[in-house]
């Protein structure tokens, strides 16, 4: 019922929003770059894009995936790393995928897991200083899969630590405040858990534990 409501709401908002955006874009084409209206017009278009993103993120919170099936967790990890690549390149930061030699099977939704990992990687990219580093790796641990994302950014400010998973809470001017909410919901839908902590010496570590589809003896190395 929530999914149907969210889809209906998204449809009701996005249709007029698209019409407004088209009209503003048409007006923008008629205004010289140095015109007095160009700046507020550009801001209006940016806000429309942000609102559309917010609607899409809200829809993702309740949208169901393509079902529960066995897959190699490296598939969504690699796809997410590929999509996040430009965000790291923009500041000269690096993203490393570590430990791909072992196939790690999990039961879940490939699209949902890709979105989960992409959300976490984009968060890390935005937190990194120029030339910073993020690593993502995975291994089996006592019947579960542990996926870990580590960065050498500034860590989590104490004043926001208790609120990072709150819907609509964001420390970024253009953030929707739904990325981590969606991430935690995806993990819970996969019967797993997610934790986020500062690392000793600086940086942030995110750990996602998911039920493994196999019970093989786990390798002992990760990041």
Image: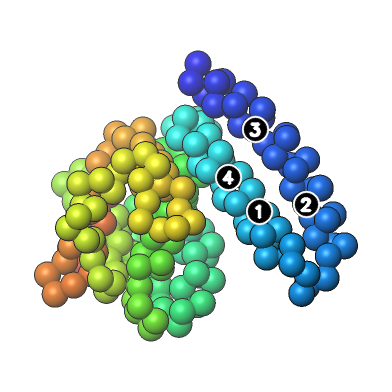
SS state under label 3:
helix
Image x and y of residue 99, in percent: 32, 67
Comes first in the chain, label 2 or label 3: 3
Near-viewer residue (166 or 74): 166
Q: Are marks 2 and 4 in contact (CB under 8 Å)?
A: no
Residue named by callout 1: 44
How packed mark 1 is, by other alpha carbons closer than 10 Å (few <14, some 14-19, many 20 or more), is some
Q: Which image quarter holds the C terminus?
A: bottom left
Residue named by callout 2: 24
Residue pushed farthest right? 30
Distance of label 2 from label 3 (alpha carbons): 17 Å
Q: Are marks 2 and 1 in contact (CB under 8 Å)?
A: yes
Q: Are marks 4 and 3 in contact (CB under 8 Å)?
A: yes
Asked which quadrant contains residue 5, the reply is top right
How packed mark 4 is, by other alpha carbons closer than 10 Å (few <14, some 14-19, many 20 or more), is some
Residue 51: mark: 4
Comes first in the chain, label 2 or label 1: 2
Distance of label 2 from label 1 (alpha carbons): 8 Å
Comes first in the chain, label 4 or label 1: 1
Image x and y of residue 211, in percent: 28, 40
Q: Residue at x 54, y 71 (%)?
A: 86
SS state under label 2:
helix
How packed mark 2 is, by other alpha carbons closer than 10 Å (few <14, some 14-19, many 20 or more), is some
């Amino acid at each position: 019922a929530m999914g149907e409501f969210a889809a209906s709401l998204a449809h009701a908002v996005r249709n007029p929003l698209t019409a407004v955006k088209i009209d503003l874009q048409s007006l923008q084409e008629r205004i010289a770059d140095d015109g007095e209206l160009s700046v507020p017009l550009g801001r209006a278009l940016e806000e429309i894009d942000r609102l559309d993103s917010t609607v899409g993120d809200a829809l993702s919170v309740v949208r169901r995936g393509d079902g529960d099936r066995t897959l190699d967790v490296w598939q969504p990890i690699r796809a997410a790393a590929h999509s996040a690549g430009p965000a790291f390149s923009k500041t000269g930061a690096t993203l490393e995928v570590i430990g791909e030699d072992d196939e790690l099977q999990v039961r879940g939704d490939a699209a949902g897991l890709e979105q989960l990992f992409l959300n976490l990687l984009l968060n890390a990219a935005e937190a990194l200083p120029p030339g910073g580093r993020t690593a993502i790796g995975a291994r089996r641990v006592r019947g579960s899969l542990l996926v870990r994302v580590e960065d050498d950014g500034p860590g989590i400010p104490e004043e926001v630590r208790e609120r990072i998973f709150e819907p609509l809470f964001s420390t970024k001017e253009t953030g929707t405040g739904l990325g981590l909410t969606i991430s935690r919901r995806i993990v819970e839908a996969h019967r797993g858990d997610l934790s986020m902590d500062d690392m000793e010496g600086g940086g942030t570590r995110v750990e996602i534990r998911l039920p493994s589809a196999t019970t093989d003896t786990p390798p002992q190395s990760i990041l």
